[in-house]
Image (tube, rainbow, N blue to C red):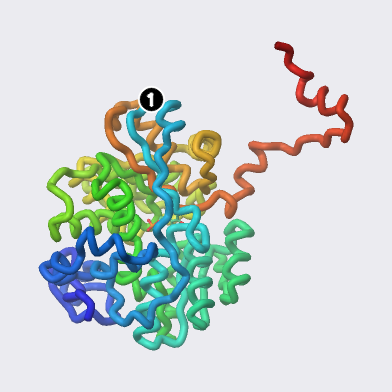
Amino acid sequence: MGYVRSLRCRECGAEYAPLRITVCERCFGPLEVAYELEAVREAFTREGLAHRPRTLWRYRELLPVVEDGARVDMQPGYTPLRRAGNLEEVLGLREVWVKDDTVNPTYSFKDRPVAVAVAKAREWDLEAVGCASTGNLAGATAAAAAKAKLPCYVFVPASLEETKLLLPRLYGATVVPVDGTYDDANRVALLAADRRGWGFVNINLRPYYAEGSKTLLFETWEQLGFDLPDVLVTPLGSGLLLTSVDKAIRELKDIGQVDGRATRIVGTQPEGCAPIVRGFESKDGRPVPVKRPDTIAESLAIGDPASGHEAIQIMRRTGGFADAPSDAEIVEAQKLLARTEGVFAEPAGGVTLAALRRALADGRIDPSERVVLLVTGNGLKAMHVMHSEFPKIPPVAPSPAAVDAFLGGIPHG
Ligand SMILES: Cc1ncc(COP(=O)(O)O)c(C=O)c1O
Ligand SMILES: [Zn+2]
């Protein structure tokens, strides 16, 4: 038996049987999975964790899949938490860690929520799965569907970067390139899924999908020796990753695994699409929708973020903040992370380091704080961003003299 108690409304607290619903019938608030936390407290122990496989299913008491056989065996998760010593030196910080989710099966953190959502779709015998995506989710859903032998339909903006359009097709999915923004793709995907009874991971399976992202935090906690950072910096698209990470922290507290010390949660978006950041800065704390996102961080180009309001509330409650670096700052941060730590993030991952640099400059993060950056996607999927940074090098003749000339001679002494 699993430990799921209900689907609970985040706004009014109403509870529902854990079925295929996503919003509260009373107030239209979003639903989230609630657990029997007293029972989880008994079953979820540090000693027990030590003997479990190094995949995200090691946190099974706080995940909503009940039938083990429904799991899709792509083995996402348990990615490295890298101590960023070189970056600490360059930035003058005491302790920085990079949670490196560039090395998941399809090279982004999206393999985590997809693992849970597709398992749920299997448990319910759904005929097909899919998603609306800014790129990474399309690949993650398509790969998991391939492994689960399910048809897959992904809706993406047609303007998407070539690799991200190609990958889901390679994994065998049907790609629907929508002539419009991500928000347009999301709208038509919703209708297509509901009319056909398909399970779209981030739409009609959203409460379950969100649970998978919590494992990023559970792992970070475990890899820090069962401790939490002072500051956690996360990218923002729809805002769901940030709300999931916060839920994970609250659950660890509720089962007595971490003390009351607060982790400040910081969210970041590119300047060219920053509806949540602008909402954070506004009085009423509501996202400020962006009609035409304009940024190299395509994965974060969501103009009307579904979980934006909750993300703002969480950043405020935890003493965090929101910030929007420019595209130029994001590229600089990607290069710095690669040069110092050997980690190649896509712009959506680089944005967290860009935000850290800005926060150090204006004092919003103190150099003595322990900082974790969530690096959620791999730079190899967005190579076009780097082409202008590294123009082609003219070839060197295969002769010692030409090599000497190229390297500027042999140093003396
Ligand atoms: C690499 C990467 N990081 C972060 C995000 C943001 O996630 P969310 O939409 O849950 O806020 C995305 C979303 O597509 C992404 O692809
Ligand atoms: Zn409600």
Image quadrant holding the N terminus, namely: bottom left
The residue located at (57%, 66%) in the rendering is 179
Picture quadrant where residue 390 is located: top right
Residue indicated by mark 1: 92
The residue located at (40%, 39%) in the rendering is 83
Image quadrant holding the C terminus, namely: top right
Is ligand 1 closer than 8 angstroms to the Cβ of mark 1? no
Q: Is residue 249 left or right of residue 148?
A: left
Q: Amino acid at mark 1?
A: Gly
Q: Position of residue 321 (x, y in %)?
A: 28, 40
Q: Is residue 333 left or right of residue 167?
A: left
The residue located at (48%, 80%) in the rendering is 148
Q: Is residue 305 visible?
A: yes
Q: Is residue 261 left or right of residue 67?
A: left
Q: Position of residue 322 (x, y in %)?
A: 32, 42
Please tell me which residue lies in front, 86 or 306: 86
Q: Is residue 300 visible?
A: no
Looking at the image, residue 25 lies above or below residue 373: below
Count of all numbered marks drawn on residues in the image? 1
Please tell me which residue lies in front, 4 or 359: 4
Q: Position of residue 226 (x, y in %)?
A: 24, 50
Residue ranking furthest to the left: 38
Judged from the image, the secondary structure of the residue bearing numbered disc 1 is: loop
Looking at the image, residue 325 lies above or below residue 378: above
Tell me if mark 1 has few (under 14), some (14-19) or many (20+) residues whose alpha carbon lies within 10 angstroms of its own. few
Picture quadrant where residue 5 is located: bottom left
Please tell me which residue lies in front, 233 or 186: 233
The residue located at (39%, 69%) in the rendering is 202
Q: Position of residue 344 (x, y in %)?
A: 54, 45
